[in-house]
Image: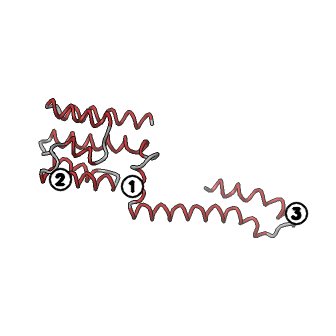
């Protein structure tokens, strides 16, 4: 930003030195730059405070970039929690607390409550209600049906992490 500030002074400099523009004209470019920066910071803070950015991150086209990282993190936490002996609702609640996206964290917490109440039968159904789909969900489903859920979650995490790295 400092380099951009200096670069925006340079175009007006010859006219100010020649006397065809007033000296305050040197500040027009940098003033526009810092105004844009202030607006961007304010919009980002307002969006983060309201949860708007979290919801937008889960919608196309941003979901293609963000979702693999969120799924990989959730699968890692779920796998570790289940390996430690936690039940599915408790593992989902733990994953909700560890989730970096507030919107997905709320979905995971709601899914934990639904599994605990018996309205959702298993982890696969809970993850499906949270928006996990495709091959990641199939790996979890296969692991759950075969009795190797931790292994399925590990494969899900690896696949999602690779997609994030390539994405």
User: Pointer 2: what residue?
Assistant: 114
Label 3: few (<14), some or many (≥20) within 10 Å?
few
Give the CA separation, mark 3 to mark 2. Answer: 73 Å
Residue 154 quadrant? top left
User: Pointer 3: what residue?
Assistant: 18
Q: How is the image coloured?
A: secondary structure
* Residue closer to the observer: 110 or 153: 110
Give the CA separation, mark 2 to mark 1. Answer: 21 Å
User: Along the polypeptide, which appears first: circle 1 or circle 3?
Assistant: 3
Image location (x, y in percent) of residue 30:
67, 62
Residue 28 quadrant? bottom right
Q: Quadrant of the N terminus?
A: bottom right
Residue at 18% from the left image edge and 47% from the top image edge = 91
**Which mark is on residue 147?**
none
* Residue closer to the observer: 35 or 17: 35
Q: Note whether 31 is above or below 137 in the view shown.
A: below
Say which element carries label 1.
helix
User: Along the polypeptide, which appears first: circle 3 or circle 2?
Assistant: 3
User: Pointer 1: what residue?
Assistant: 55
Residue at 33% from the left image edge and 55% from the top image edge = 103
Say which element carries label 2.
helix
Give the CA separation, mark 1 to mark 3. Answer: 53 Å
Label 2: few (<14), some or many (≥20) within 10 Å?
some
């Amino acid at each position: 930003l400092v380099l951009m500030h200096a670069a925006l002074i340079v175009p007006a400099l010859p006219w100010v030195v020649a006397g065809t523009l007033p000296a305050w004209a040197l500040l027009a470019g940098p003033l526009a730059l810092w105004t844009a920066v202030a607006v961007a910071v304010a919009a980002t803070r307002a969006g983060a405070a309201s949860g708007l950015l979290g919801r937008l991150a889960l919608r196309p086209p941003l979901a293609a970039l963000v979702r693999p990282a969120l799924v990989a993190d959730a699968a890692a936490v779920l796998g570790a929690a289940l390996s430690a002996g936690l039940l599915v609702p408790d593992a989902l609640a733990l994953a909700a607390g560890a989730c970096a996206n507030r919107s997905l964290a709320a979905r995971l917490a709601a899914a934990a409550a639904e599994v605990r109440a018996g309205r959702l039968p298993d982890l696969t159904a809970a993850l499906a209600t949270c928006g996990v789909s495709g091959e990641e969900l199939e790996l979890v489903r296969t692991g759950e049906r075969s009795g190797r859920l931790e292994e399925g979650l590990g494969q899900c995490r690896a696949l999602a992490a690779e997609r994030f790295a390539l994405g």
